[in-house]
Amino acid sequence: MRGYVPGCEVKVPVTLAEALDVLAAEPGGWRPMAGGTDLMVLFNAGRMPAGRFLDLSRIEELRGIWEDETTLRFGALTTFSEMRDCPSVHRHLPNLVKSARATGALAIQNRGTLGGNIANASPAADTPPSLLAYGAELELVSLRGRRTVAYDAFHQGYKQMDLAVDELVAGIRVPKPQGLGFHFYRKVGTRQAQAISKLCLAAYARIEGGLIAEFRVGLGSLAPAPVRARRAEAMILGKPLTALQVTAAREALMADICPIDDIRSTVHYRRVVTANVFQQMLEELAHA
Ligand SMILES: Cc1cc2nc3c(=O)[nH]c(=O)nc-3n(C[C@H](O)[C@H](O)[C@H](O)COP(=O)(O)OP(=O)(O)OC[C@H]3O[C@@H](n4cnc5c(N)ncnc54)[C@H](O)[C@@H]3O)c2cc1C
């Protein structure tokens, strides 16, 4: 049965403190809603018939993109369009611009938020691989206080997160890449636009004196949650650009992933294409 709109309750707090009060008073009783682009699909499909929504969209404290010398900080309500159009994001975090452009169509980009993309916890979401590659951190907030979690420790399994029922994602902090950087983002879907990923790979490397001084790879649709390619990273980190062990790193990558057959793709396709995209990335890195 479809969700029944007149049966819904919606609270619309205008401050973060007000929203946290509601979540603390009835833990699990109210579902945070940002852009609603994931939630309304579930609601319409009848998967949350008795909707009690905490609409976050009026909370100014959750908006905006700030930067200082070392960091870009995104309020959880930052939309894909805001990321896509922000000159600082273009300059420092081009993979995040590509992720935003690759997400849905313009209507979704105008309404969907970064916080929602993270907290929806889909393994196929498009910004998590970039956030993993850039070493992002999340600011989580509740009446009990504020805490910071490394994004690569946040997803703990399929739809499992280090997020309590009375907590909100308040912001996303991404360190600004320093020095000579290499950025790579590739989403593979059925079409160039408006397709959910069959697989997604984002990478960031910092090059210092001809060596790979920093290297992270984020993967989407290749495990129950967005994951880092830690084994493959270890094969590349610290190596000279001129002697990257491509074959060994490709093999290591296969141990980092555990794709499934589903309506979008197969295990075989995902393994083969991921290895090829990874190799293409390493070949571009070798010429950076
Ligand atoms: C037609 C269509 C196409 C799409 N295409 C793509 C695509 O190509 N790539 C992609 O990645 N996604 C896609 N999506 C999914 C969706 O648009 C994104 O996941 C979006 O980022 C969700 O953000 P939202 O603000 O709309 O989240 P909502 O729907 O409001 O919420 C999603 C989840 O996050 C929780 N939540 C939201 N904000 C917070 C917060 N601050 N703190 C704690 N929990 C929170 C909610 O409780 C809910 O569980 C598509 C959706 C549609 C309908």
Image: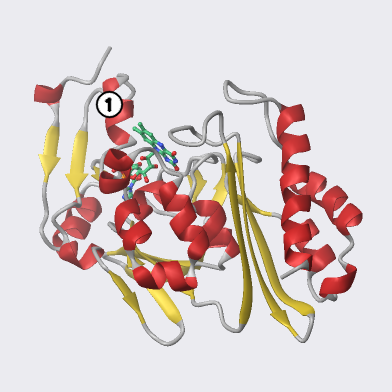
Q: Outermost residue toward the front?
A: 287
Q: Quarter of the image for the C terminus: give it.
A: bottom right
Q: Is residue 112 above or below residue 114?
A: above
Q: Is residue 72 above or below residue 49?
A: below
Q: Quarter of the image for the N terminus: give it.
A: top left
Residue named by callout 1: 43
Give the left or right position of residue 116, taking residue 130 as reference. Answer: left
At a point 11% along the width and 54% down the height, the residue shown is 13
At a point 25% along the width and 22% down the height, the residue shown is 49
Q: Where, by quadrant of the figure, is residue 206 drawn? A: bottom right
- Is the CB of mark 1 within 8 Å of ligand 1? no
Q: How is the image coloured?
A: secondary structure
Between residue 131 and residue 47, name the one nearer to us.
131
**Residue 238, image x and y in percent?**
81, 76
Q: Where, by quadrant of the figure, is residue 20 drawn? A: bottom left
At a point 43% along the width and 67% down the height, the residue shown is 90
Q: Where, by quadrant of the figure, is residue 194 drawn? A: top left
| SS at mark 1 in the image | helix
Between residue 141 and residue 114, name the one nearer to us.
114
Q: Is residue 237 above or below residue 159?
A: below
Give the left or right position of residue 37, taking residue 275 as reference. Answer: left
Residue 176 visible in the displayed image: yes
The number of discs equals 1
